[in-house]
Image (cartoon, rainbow, N blue to C red):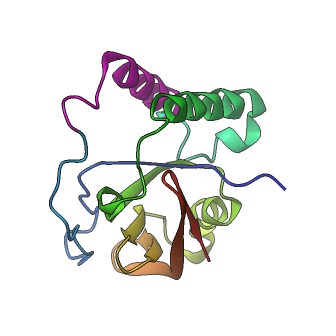
Amino acid sequence: MPMATTLLLPHPFKSQNPNSKFPTPRYSHPRFTCCSVTAQSRSAREHLLALISDQDRGLITQKDPARRASIVEAIDAMAALGAGSITTGDSLSGTWRLLWTTEKEQLFIVEKAHLFGTRAGDVLQVIDVRKRTLNNVITFPPDGVFFVRSNIEIASPQRVNFR
């Protein structure tokens, strides 16, 4: 069974619900330095964002294998550009907004929210590398939330596994 692919990019998190109280990142450090953002990586990032911009977090992609393959290829290209960098350090800690995923359970909840008389709002991951925690959060405005708590382990300088 293939592993789910999820795209979480460093975006300043602004909840769609102004009354929400999600944690803010605990560590202050730049996500990128001027040396780490090359023209090539910037171009790859823009290409990937363009590919996912109309995919409704991955819901549309489920029915389009060619588009899914293009997106996964673009993610792999970005990973190749970052080969050798450490992506599992403190800079991973924070609140991340889900932009795209192949993870079936998250997509199911987002797609079927209307059956419960609501709609899905933000889909987030709150990661704390030092505490080894990862929390998946799906919001349902105005005050609903689906929350899954898990632990993470650093598998390599570029990979985190969760359980």
Quarter of the figure with residue 77: top right
x%, y% of residue 94?
30, 64
**As drawn, 152 above or below 16:** below
**As drawn, 117 above or below 10:** below
Quarter of the figure with residue 135: bottom left
Residue 50 among magenta residues: yes
Work out whether residue 20 or residue 48 is closer to the camera in this orientation and state it.
48
Residue 163 among magenta residues: no
Residue sitting at 28 percent across and 32 percent down? 36
Residue sitting at 59 percent across and 33 percent down? 76
Residue sitting at 41 percent across and 50 percent down? 87
Quarter of the figure with residue 163: bottom right
**As drawn, 60 above or below 24:** above
Work out whether residue 23 or residue 105 is closer to the camera in this orientation and state it.
23
Q: Count the marks: how many?
A: 0
- Give the extent of the magenta segment: 33-52
x%, y% of residue 118?
49, 71
Residue sitting at 65 percent across and 26 percent down? 70
x%, y% of residue 17?
27, 68
